[in-house]
Amino acid sequence: MHADLTGSFNIGVYKSLFEYNHDACYAVDLDGNFILFNEEAVAITGYSPQEAFGMNFVSIIHEDYLEDTIEHFRRVTGGVRERFETVIVKKNSGERADILLTVVPITAKGKIIGAVGCAQDVTKQKELEALLSGQNQILEMIAKGASFREVLNNIILWIERFMNGARSSIMIADQDGNRLVHGSSPSLPDKYNAAVNGIPIGPSVGSCGTAAYLRRSVTVTDIGTDPLWADYRDLALSCGLKACWSSPLFDDDQRVIGTFGLYYDHSSSPREKDMQTIQKATDLTSLAIQHYRAKEKINFMAYHDALTGLPNRRLFDQRVQEALGETMVRAGEKLCLMFLDLDRFKIVNDSFGHMMGDKLLKYVSQKLKKCIGQEVLISRQGGDEFAILLEHTSREEAEVIAQQILKSMSEVFLVDGTEIYMTTSVGMSFFPDDGEELGILLSKADVAMYQAKKQGRNNYQTYDIMLDKKSLEKLQIENELRKALWRNEFELHYQPIFNLCKNKIIGAEALLRWKNEKCGNVPPQKFIPIAEETGLIVPIGEWVLKTALLQLKRWHSSGLKPLTISVNLSIRQFYQPNLIQMIREALDETGVNPQCLTIEVTESMTMDVESASFILHELKKLGVNISIDDFGTGYSSLNYLKRLPIDYLKIDRSFIQDIAENKSDENIATTIILMAHNLGLSVIAEGVETEEQLALLKQHRCNEAQGYLFSKPVPAEQFPKHR
C-alpha cells in the first residue's frame, strides 16, 4: 500500500510539473508525433492539445530550420540530452517564433521510447538582439564614412526584416523645409519613387507630406479612396500599394528633417509590437540625416565664405585650375578672371560699423549673382574683394559683363533703412593672352583692378602688357600692402643698441618687416615709400609704435630694465595732426615710462624748422627722447640743430662703412661726434660691422652703436637676454 501511494504521488508530481510549468512542455514518440502538450505549448504554437496529438513536430518547424531540428531529434532518441534553438510557424498568424528547446530521451525498462522537452519562446529576445546587431552595423557604417544612400538603404532593409511584408521609405526635407525629396526606398518601384520625389509639405499633399506638416504620424488606410492621395492614387494602386503609414523625423531641436513611411499591399497600419522597431529605425534615420548634413555643412564651410555663402578662395582656385585644364577648342574662346574691389568700403565700416558692413557685403553678393547669373562662379576672396570666373568667353563679352556689374553696383543699396551708395573697380585678365597659370592670371587681374582705382574708381580695366615689371611690382606691393595690416602680416625685428662705455645693451631699435603670401619677404626700402605715398604709413606706424611699446613692457616685466626702445617716424606721420595725441595714448595704454621711448626722425624732416621745432617741443613735453636719424645725409645747419630739442644724433651707416679705410669718412664721423658733444648731444653710430670700426668709434668717444658686429635685427624672442 505504501508503495502504491508513493507511486501515485510521484505520478501526480510529474503531471503537475508538466501541466503547470511556465515553459511549454511536450512529449513525442520515437516517430516524432506529439503525445503530450501543455497549456503553455498551446499558447506558443496556437495548436490545441487535441490538434497537436498525432501531429508530427516537423509540421510546425520552419523549413529553413527543419534539417537541423531533425538531426537534434535523432541524437536525443539515440540517448543524448540536447539544448538548441529552432524556429516554428504559428498556426493562426503564420508568424515565426524563435524557440529554445531542452530535450531529453524517455526510457522505460532500459529502452528509449520517445522524448520529452521544454520550450522557451525567445522571439522577443532574438528580435532585440537582431535589432541591436543591425543598429550597431548601421552605426559602424556611419562611423566608417559609408555613403548617405548606402546607410539609408541598409536602414530600410534592416527594418523590413521585422515588418511582416511592409515596404519602407525615407523622405528628407530640403534645406528650406518646404519639400520632401526621395532618400531611400529600395523595395518600392522606381516610377513611384520618382513620382513622389519633391512632394511639398502641406495639409493635403499625401501621407508623407501631411505627416511632416502636421508633425505627427498619419495613417492612410485606403490609398484608393483617400483624397490626400488623389495625385498618386493610380500610380500607387498600379504598384500594389493600398495603405501607408508615415511619421515625421526630427532633429535635436525638434525641427522636421524628413519622414519615415511604411507601405502595405492590404489595408493596414503598424502593429503595436512593431512600434519599438519603428522607433529605433526613425532614431537611426534622424541620426544619419543629421550626421551627413553636418558633414555636408563642414564641407560647405571649408569651400565657402561664412558671411555671404559664396565660394571662397580655395574653391575658386580649384575651379579655375579645372577650367584651365580643359582644352579650349572653339576659335576665339578665352577664359576671363575678374577681380572686384568695392570703392571706399572702409568708410562704410568706419561710419556705420562692421555689422552694417557685413550686411552690405551680403547685398553685394546677392546683386552680383542676380546681375550675372547663378551659373557663373563668383567668389568672395576676403574683405571687400570678389573674383569672377568667365568660361568660354571673349574680350567683348567680358567687357559687356563688366559694364553690367558697374551699372548694377552703382544703384543705391538700402540697408536697414539706410541708403548707401557704392561703386566698384574691376580688373580683368585673360587666358591664354595674359598667362596660362592661375597665380599669374589672378595677379594681373589684381593689378588691372588697381589701375581701375587709379583711373578714378567705378570703372574696369583689362591688364595692359605695356606695364613694365617695375610698375607691375609696385602695383602688386601696393595692392597687398592695403591688406597687410588686417591680415597680420607685419612683424617687428629688434636690433640691439650698445653703450660703448659700459659695453652693454641699453636699448633696441624697432624695425618693420613684412612677409606676404604673394610677394614674399618684401624689403622695407620697397614697401615703406609706397606706404608713405599712399598714406598707409599712418595706420602702419601706429601699429609699430604700440607693438614696440608692448614688447618693451614685456621685457621690463622680465627684468630687462631700464631697456629703451627707438621707433622711427616717417615724414607723413611726423606731420599728421594727431601725432602727439596718438603717442600719448600709446604710452598710457601700455604703461611705458616716456623716458624709455626714443622717437627717431630724419634730418630732412627738420628742414621746415618752425613746424618741426613746434612738433618736437610737443614731443619733449611728453617726456620722450628725440633722435635725428641718418645724420650727415641732409642739409640741416648747425644753427637749426641748436634750436631743436634733440637728444641723439645718429651717424648714417654710409660714413661708418669705410671709416677704417677712408680717412675722409673717419674725419666726417669724428667731426659729427665732436660737434654733437659740443652741443650736449649723444651720438649713435649705425651699421657697425667690424672690430676696426668699433675701435675707432671708441677712440673718438662715440657714445652708442648698433650693427651686425653686435647683432642683426631679430624677432623679439631671439633678442639677446644678456646686457
Image (cartoon, rainbow, N blue to C red):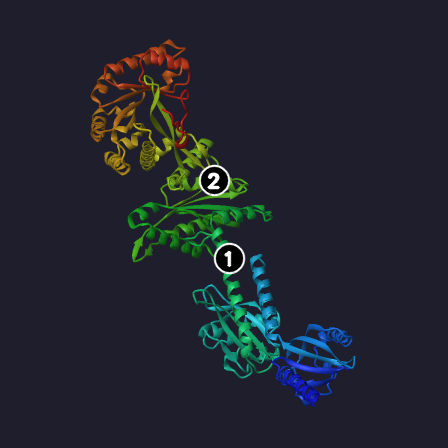
Q: Residues within 10 Å of mark 2 (few under 14, many from 20)?
A: many
* Extreme-top residue of the structure: 663
User: Visible in this render: residue 433?
Assistant: yes
Q: Residue at x 34, y 27 (%)?
A: 509
Residue 496 sits in which quadrant? Answer: top left
What residue is pinned by disc 2?
444
Q: Residue at x 57, y 76 (%)?
A: 263
Residue 450 sits in which quadrant? Answer: top left
Residue 37 falls left or right of residue 639: right
Q: Secondary structure at mark 2?
A: helix
Labels 1, 2: front one:
1
- Image quarter (top left, top right, bottom left or bottom right) of the C terminus: top left
Does 671 sit above or below residue 560? above
Q: Residues within 10 Å of mark 1 (few under 14, many from 20)?
A: few
What residue is pinned by disc 1?
296
Does 95 sit above or below residue 180? below
**Where residue 581 sits in the image (x, y, percent)?**
23, 36
**Where residue 454 sits in the image (x, y, percent)?**
37, 39
Residue 496 falls left or right of residue 58: left
Whole-Å distance between the Cαs marked 1 and 2?
34 Å
